[in-house]
Amino acid sequence: MIPATTIKLAHNEVIKDANPTLAGTLAQTLANPEIDRFSEDDSQFLKFHGIYQQDDRDKRKVAKHYMFMIRTRLPGGVIPSEQYIALDDIASKYANNTLRITSRQGFQFHGIVKSGLGKTMRAINDALITTLAACGDVNRNVMAPSTPATSCLVERVLQDARKLSTALLPLTPAYHQIWVEGQELNLEDEKVKDFVDPLYGKTYLPRKFKVAFAIPPLNDVDVFTNCLGFVAIGEGDRLDGYNLVAGGGLGMSHGNAETFPRIADVIGFFTPEHIEAVSKAVLTVHRDFGDRTNRKHARLKYVLEDRGVEWFRAEVEKRVGIKFEAARPHKFTKQGDLFGWHRQFDGKDFLGLYVETGRIKDTETHKLKSALRKIADQFHAELRLTPSQNLILANIDPANRDAITKILADHGVAVENQGSLLRRTSMACPALPTCGLALAESERVLPDILGRIEGLLDEVGLMENEIVIRMTGCPNGCARPYMAEIGFVGKAPNKYQIYLGGNEASTRLNRLYKEGVKNEEIVNELRPLLSRFVQERDGAERFGDFCARVLWAEQPPAPAATN
């Protein structure tokens, strides 16, 4: 082992070690009206509190206009109507009058200025919602199936998601003191000056940590893309236990072969009573063995890649004090959401709504934000955010179905025929102008690109075919483009990498097909492929499977996750 004195730690490790409360000088800067931004070090601490410091990149030619994005922590994406009403008010009063559904079932507020930052955070906490650990080198929002369609097993799994969300939460006193009490943390307080988080330790994790639950055959959470995943094994309302999967993650850097997307390995089966211990064991393996010298190599996926599955299984078993059973048989067949009205297992109804690029807003002809507010006010519907950035209105009394449909229709929101097959399975990250990492557009251009691809599908006779398309403005993969049948990843302004070959079950990585394709050239690049697909398709084969079978014949595609 290399002596600790010779290791050069990443800068984030140094500042975490010096500020284990994660307070930095946040309170002082927040209280100073003469300052419009936080220091670079404090901007790293802000992430642990669920806040990103950004600037409007559309205005950079004039001057940097600093603003903030706030992300909520909502286990499984479940929001009671009262809390949604509070978030809707916050979006209107302090943000840009939109709510952005994230690919991890949370909400993001954009465009908040520093003078409104403290007020926004207090309003969120007053609604009994937290933003703590929605970002940062800790466990992020815990994902879980959102569709209450088949059995109460969904509700049972949601209970475990909430349990883990609480169990894996950091305990820093700074969050409540700064954002709820509005005071500077007293570093001389005996409980504060020697603070070390009991789970995360003094320097937390080397990088972010992501957890998700899935119930076969629906892989709506893309469970194999997570650091830690739980595949529910059971029947009806009986939960026998979980298959543990670990080591997934999609972030990479262009031109850096040491960074890459990776699907999780299946580790073994365990019974439900061990879930908290297993989760903490996996998290602390990341804490203790993750790379703290190179943040690009610091995710748990690289620990498994470098040390192997057998080593990882043995290390987790040692920490939990159990032996995993062999993984139980399971099979994923699809991912995605249900749209329109459906009956729940308990006799109530739910409504799946398509939300273009995850942005809840009002336009001149499509007033989704106003419609949802009215429905929440009148019918107290529970809202559930899906991992594909769509929305479910759950637990609806069937007697209210027609009235809710009318409210939506009056606001220009359809219940039937909600967009094309192509649009309903698409995803995009926010990218420009708010994200500082964006190399190209995503949310603002994807609707137009989809329109052009729809024209191409009509041209070649494939308009009734579903193809999963996802786009990001950079290679970090927030919209999970590396699992899509067609993935567009920003490389430079107006240029994208095209990835092809993901599958419907979201268990296979796609592969790079073309580099540096201009936005206006995308359709011309896809035309010969889709034309060939029409001619060489094997029965009802999907486009992603065709690409994996034909395009990568000489270089086989990455293996599917074990089912």
Image (tube, helix red, strand yellow):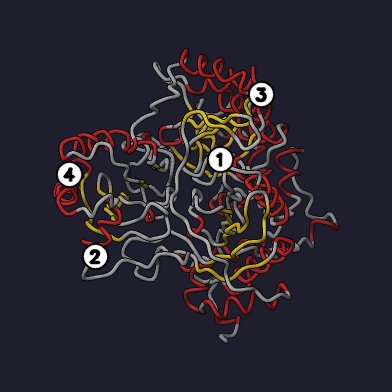
Which element is circle 1 on?
loop
Left or right: where 532 falls relative to 223: left
Amino acid type, mark 1: Thr
Above or below, 43 relative to 407: below
Left or right: where 219 falls relative to 200: left
Q: CA distance from mark 1 to mark 2?
A: 35 Å
- Residue receiving disc 2: 552
Q: CA distance from mark 1 to mark 4?
A: 37 Å
In front: label 1 or label 4: 1
Q: Give the mark nearer the N terminus: 2 vs 3.
A: 3
Q: Residues within 10 Å of mark 2 (few under 14, many from 20)?
A: some
Which element is circle 4 on?
helix
- Residue receiving disc 4: 521
Amino acid type, mark 4: Glu
Q: Residues within 10 Å of mark 1 (few under 14, many from 20)?
A: many
User: Can residue 121 be seen by looking at this rendering?
Assistant: yes
Which element is circle 2 on?
loop
Query: In the rendering, which numbered label is found on residue 380?
Result: 3
- Residue receiving disc 1: 147
Amino acid type, mark 2: Trp
- Residue 229 position in % (x across, y down): 57, 60
| Labels 2 and 4 touching (C-beta < 8 A) | no
